[in-house]
Structures are given as C-alpha cells and as structure tokens.
Image (tube, rainbow, N blue to C red):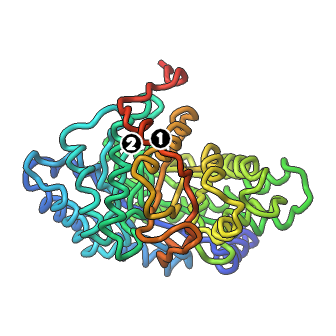
Amino acid sequence: MLNTSEILSTISMIKEQKLDIRTITMGISLLECAGEGAAEKIYDLVTRRAERLVAVGEEIEREFGIPIVNKRISVTPVSLILGEREDPVAVALALDRAAGTTGVNFIGGYSALVQKGATRNDLRLIRSIPEALSRTELVCASVNVASTRAGVNMDAVRLMGEIILETARLTAGRDGLGCAKLVAFANAVEDNPFMAGAFHGAGEGDTAVNVGVSGPGVVKRALEACRGEPFDVVAETIKKTAFRITRMGQLVALEASKRLGAPFGIVDLSLAPTPAVGDSVAHILEEMGLERCGQHGTTAALMMLNDAVKKGGVMASSSVGGLSGAFIPLSEDIGMIDAARAGTLTLDKLEAMTSVCSVGLDMVAVPGDTPAATLAAILADEAAIGVVNQKTTAVRIIPVPGKGVGEWVEFGGLLGRAPIIPVHPESAEAFIARGGRIPAPINSLKN
C-alpha cells in the first residue's frame, strides 16, 4: 500500500528526474508459423496478437501518468522457423510491415543462436542480415555466438565481423545505422525487452508481456543526498531507489498483461540512459566521487551500482529478469559521450567495465576502415568475458563508413551521437582465421 509521501515522491521522480518505463515489449512465439510460407503467416500472427499493444500502452500512460517511451515486439528467433525455400529477407520485410501496422517502435528476433554450431538456416539468416537491415526500418537482429556451457564459436565470430562491416557498407548513406540494430551476444537471455537484442525464447509461451524500467536520473538524485558517506550507505541508497523504480515497473507490467490478455513475463530494471541531460549512468558514477567516467576507479563504482540495482529490484518483484543492471551505451549517455570526447573513456576501458555491467560494448562508433578481423576480435574478447563470468555480454559496434577517429556520428533520438574512437591498429587476421571453437571453461561443469 503506497502512502501519500511515496506517491508524491514517485510523481517527483517522473516529473523532475526523468523516471520512465523505457519499454513495454510483447513477446510472440512464431513456432506455429514454421515452414513454407512463413512470411505471410508471421505477418498475420504478429498483427493479430499485438493489435492493441500500442493503444494499451498509451491508455496506461494517460491513466497512471507514467511516461512509456517505447512499445516493442520480440519474436521467436527467425532461423528456427525458416522453411528450406523461404527467403529470410522476405521474412524480415514481413516483420517490418507487421511492426508498421501495429505502430510499435521496433521488432526484434531476426536472430540465430549459434554458440555451439550453426545449421543451414542459421547461416542463411546470418548472411542475409546486411540486406535485411538495409531494407527495413524497424527490424532488429541478433546472433548468439557464445555461452558458458558451449564456449565461443569462433567460426560464427569471424562471420559476424564480416556481417557487421557489410551492414555498415549497405547503410553507409545513414552512417552505418544498420549496425545500431545488430547485436552479437554471449549468453543471450530469452526474455530481454530491450532492443536491439530482444527475442522471444523457445522456452517461452505463446505470448508474454515484459517491461523495461529506467531511472538513472532518480539514482543520481538519491546519491546527491549522501555525498561523503561510505560505500555501504551508497549501496543501500541505490537498493532502496531500485526497489521503488521496480515497483512502478511491476505495476505497469501487470496492468498491461491484464489489458492485453497476455501473461506477465518479467520486469527488467536496467538503468538505460538517454542522451538527455540528467539521464546518465556516467553521471551516477561521477556522483560517487569520480572526476570523470573512465578514470581509475570507474569499474569498481560500476560493479557496486550494478549489484545494488539487482538487489533492490529482486526485493521488489518475484519476476525480475531480462538483463537488469546498468547499461553503458556510449552514444546514448551524455556523460559517457563527454568522457569519450575527453579521451578518458577508451575502448579498452569500456571493455573492462563490461565485466561488471549489465551487458557489454554498446553503441560504440569506430573508424569505417576497421578490418572485419578486428571487429571479430573485439567480439571474441567480449564473448570471453561473458563466458568466463557466466553473464550476458554483447557487442553493438558501428564502423562508420568514410569517417575516422575524432569525427562525430549523429544517429538521432534515443540512439544519440558519439565521437568515433580508435581501435588497436595491430592485425588480428591470423588469430581470427583459426576458426573452430574456444572450449567451454571449467566453471561450466555444473551438473
């Protein structure tokens, strides 16, 4: 039961501290569409099941006074339902049409899971990604190349380096924007509501409603009240704030579930920043006493933030899932943009931070002439962090055609803007050319 002070506090968080529901994502199983003629069956199924998703989101937003930034759809990984003669790009176009018809912001699930090996359909889908993303507006793609139980599929890693570069080339007129809709994962989760990596896992039901909550500004404001206090006080403050944020997310998720007639899945309480002032994860870290995000001490501060957010959220809901933690997307966080521009936040430091954050290298712009093998090596490093630490990691990297270090790329909206940062010039060709599979680590033997 909320008392008056808690209600007023929540109103303040929404109006002054940029608290919002980042997304209501409806997961939809496409398994019944498998086989020939999948494209039209998918369009019909998605538009029928998500027909009221946007309207319901807008109703809840009006009635509860809570901003809901995005309404999205995630679907079964498409490689699992492709017919032998089905053109994968035709399915991508059908998904794009369905997203347009329902009015959602994005649709995710143009995906393949190849952490241990790839089927013919997996490879067909992966090789079609550049064309699919260049010909669609709302479709997001992802490929899981590694897991703690399987190790790292280096053949898939090598292929994804080439796919990222080709996607950038085919969307060169928009500064490689297609790559902003493409994620390579290790340990991908099946109930992630956030794009570009959302898909509806094979272990899920016909539908599910997953909600992603975000509130970096709320956490920063809470920490302003405990400047100079020891870290255990800081951690407790973050936990209490995450609890309140998650409660709001659960309220919206349950209401959306009831109105849509779809089971409630999870609340993902990730702190997902935006380019707006006052909505930055980097500024939370700096509020802890760092002069600039990226300096020595940043990884420790991020570890504590991520852990405290999870602990607070778990107490607020029995269905916390997705990724849940702190995102560090370079182009989408004003504090990180400033740190990268100042040279404090480098690619190597970002990689170190991903060992303790919610996901991985996200929305990082690099020179357009970066070789495919270098991109693949970056993926391999990130996958290794996820595999050994038994956590989800991901790479969303944009080699910006025709641009180099020090120049800027403007994506607009939530995707923001970013300085193009350097990669190591040394060649990774011989390393990536080995292929094969890096075996699963000893800590994978759990049974």
Is 175 on the left or on the right of 1, as rendered? left
Cα gap from disc 1 to disc 2, whole angstroms:
7 Å
Query: In the picture shown, does residue 171 fall above or below 265?
Result: below
Q: Which residue is mark 2?
A: 157
Q: Looking at the picture, tell me which residue is in the foreground, 302 or 53.
A: 302
Q: Which residue is painted at 47% across and 58% down in the image?
A: 397
Residue 359 is situated, as x and y percent measured from the top left of the image, at: 54, 50
Identify the image quadrant of the N terminus.
Answer: bottom right
Residue 350 is situated, as x and y percent measured from the top left of the image, at: 62, 53
* Residue 146 shows up from this direction: no
Q: Which residue is mark 1?
A: 380
Q: Are marks 1 and 2 in contact (CB under 8 Å)?
A: yes
Q: Looking at the picture, tell me which residue is in the foreground, 330 or 164.
A: 164
Q: Which mark is residue 327?
A: none
Q: Looking at the picture, tell me which residue is in the foreground, 111 or 53.
A: 111
Q: Which residue is painted at 19% across and 65% down in the image?
A: 94
Q: Element type at marker 1? A: helix
Total numbered circles: 2
- Which callout, 1 or 2, points at the residue further toward the start of the chain? 2
Q: Which residue is painted at 67% across and 77% down in the image?
A: 277
The crowding category of the residue bearing disc 2, from other C-alpha atoms within 10 Å (few below 14, some 14 to 19, many at least 20), is: many
* Residue 201 shows up from this direction: yes
Amino acid bearing label 2: Val
